[in-house]
Amino acid sequence: TWLLYLPCTWSIALASDPGCLPHLGMLTLFGTGALLMRGAGCTINDMWDKDFDKKVSRTATRPIASGEVSQMQALVFLGGQLSLALGVLLCLNYYSIALGAASLSLVITYPLMKRITYWPQFVLGLTFNWGALLGWSAVKGSCDWSVCLPLYFSGVMWTLIYDTIYAHQDKEDDVKVGVKSTALRFQEQTKPWLSGFTVAMMSGLVAAGVNAEQTLPYYAVLSTVAVHLMHQV
């Protein structure tokens, strides 16, 4: 949930008036939305992947894969999750409602990407970082693309970093069930790829900060983030 929520907070914070803290009500609303949509995404993923999950010891006990929950029961539960998430979305302005609704196609199709491309983590990044666009529009009424696009790009790069690292633990199972990942694509070249994603991410965050007219504290935080990421990689 945090991985879905944090890009929202970045955008809301950048959209705040100079010298002011981010709007607490908006942060709370987006936190609720992130929790609901993360849950919906997990349900969709488990519905798509039930046959794969049965073959992997780590996921074989998931409710749908184990047969504890039927596909119909999961569908009804998903409907409830999406209905509650829609209630949160309807609290925003019309521009943001349309923008938020546009992300649903990514939420539904992301789990299929591991079947057809070695870059499912890229599609996950497009999905998980939609809040980088939505947070700004919720505060300002529409997107300033000079800020939102570099911020969104940085979020996608961040997802490629952390989910590629995570995907390395599942490489053997992925090969066994026939799904793809960036970990399988990069193999022994993972570190150079992740270093490149880190440079791209930080460049995007700098560009977003410049266009949003951020001051020294913003860049001090970015320096800390860069050191952390390089240590992680």
Image (spheres, helix red, strand yellow):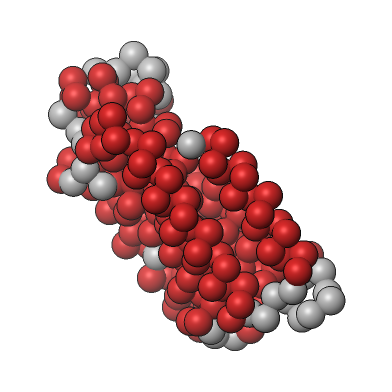
- Rendered view: 184 above or below 208: above
Location of the N terminus by quadrant is top right
> Is 222 on the left-hand or right-hand side of 55?
right
> Is 64 on the left-hand or right-hand side of 142?
left
Q: Quadrant of residue 180?
A: top left
Quick one: 57 or 74, which is closer to the camera? 57
- Rendered view: 87 above or below 39: below
Give the residue drawn at x 79%, y 80%. Answer: 18
Whole-percent x, y for residue 217 in the image: 77, 65
Residue lying at the far top of the rendered structure: 57
Q: Quadrant of residue 12?
A: bottom right
Whole-percent x, y for residue 30 in the image: 63, 61
> Is 26 on the left-hand or right-hand side of 87?
right
Q: How many marks?
A: 0
Give the residue drawn at x 53%, y 59%. Answer: 202
Give the residue drawn at x 42%, y 40%. Answer: 163
Whole-percent x, y for residue 227 in the image: 62, 45
Quick one: 37 or 164, which is closer to the camera? 164
Kindly tell me whether residue 226 is visible in this rendering. Answer: yes
